[in-house]
Image (cartoon, rainbow, N blue to C red):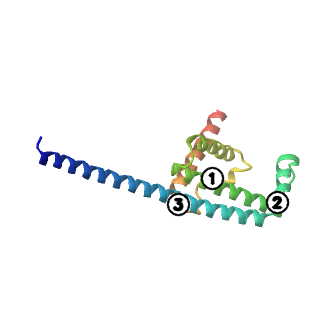
Amino acid sequence: MKIPTYQFVAQMAAAFAVVVSLGLVAYELKLSRDLGMAEMMLTRINSDNDLTVALMGIDPFNRALKKLNVTREELTWEEQSAYDEAMNARILTWYSDFNLWNMGLLSQEEWDLIERVIKETIADPRYSKYVDPTLDDYGNVSYLEKLRELWDEVEAEKASSAE
């Protein structure tokens, strides 16, 4: 081969290397953006949960748990409010987990476990009122679709076990 041919091949290889490196830089920027979004989302949800815990009070919540799970007594307004706030915080945490899973920052095994807990919550009449797949506080359509899908699965399981 002549020197101009080597030069051409070397220039083509260099151009290809530049294109590949730009692609890798773009991918790295996307990953950094995803991590930044996840951190921002977690900060927001943790802030909401901290406020919820501060407002609900631990004592009324503990009394509510005891009444619901042990004595089966009727809850006072304060206990019911504390319990409602705790369930709302739990749902916010599921929302956070769903978004982390969608971004690839939560493993499939962890998400499967969370999904199972959501389904158990939906299946229990004491708790299912808290998981309303028609409410959308954060504008996340894919999260609502996932809740509706899980809700439908639980309803189908109930129907098949009733037969």
* Crowd band around label 1 with a 10 angstrom C-alpha radius: few (<14), some (14–19), many (20+): some
**Which of the two discs, 3 and 1, sits closer to the camera?**
3
Mark 1 = which residue? 94
* Crowd band around label 2 with a 10 angstrom C-alpha radius: few (<14), some (14–19), many (20+): some
- What amino acid is at disc 2? Ile
Q: Earlier in the sequence, mark 1 or mark 2?
A: 2
Q: CA distance from mark 2 to mark 3?
A: 31 Å
Please name the residue shown 60% across and 47% down the image. Answer: 151
Looking at the rendered structure, which numbered label has been put on residue 37? 3
Q: Position of residue 100 (x, y in %)?
A: 56, 52
Q: Give the SS element for disc 3.
A: helix
Mark 2 = which residue? 58
State whether residue 53 is above or below residue 71: below
Indicate the quadrant containing the N terminus: top left, top right, bottom left or bottom right. Answer: top left
Q: Give the SS element for disc 2.
A: helix
- What amino acid is at disc 3? Met
63 horizontally vs 125: left or right:
right
Q: Quadrant of residue 162?
A: top right
* Crowd band around label 3 with a 10 angstrom C-alpha radius: few (<14), some (14–19), many (20+): some
Q: Earlier in the sequence, mark 3 or mark 1?
A: 3
Q: CA distance from mark 1 to mark 2?
A: 21 Å
Compare residues 112 and 63 and report the one nearer the observer.
Answer: 112
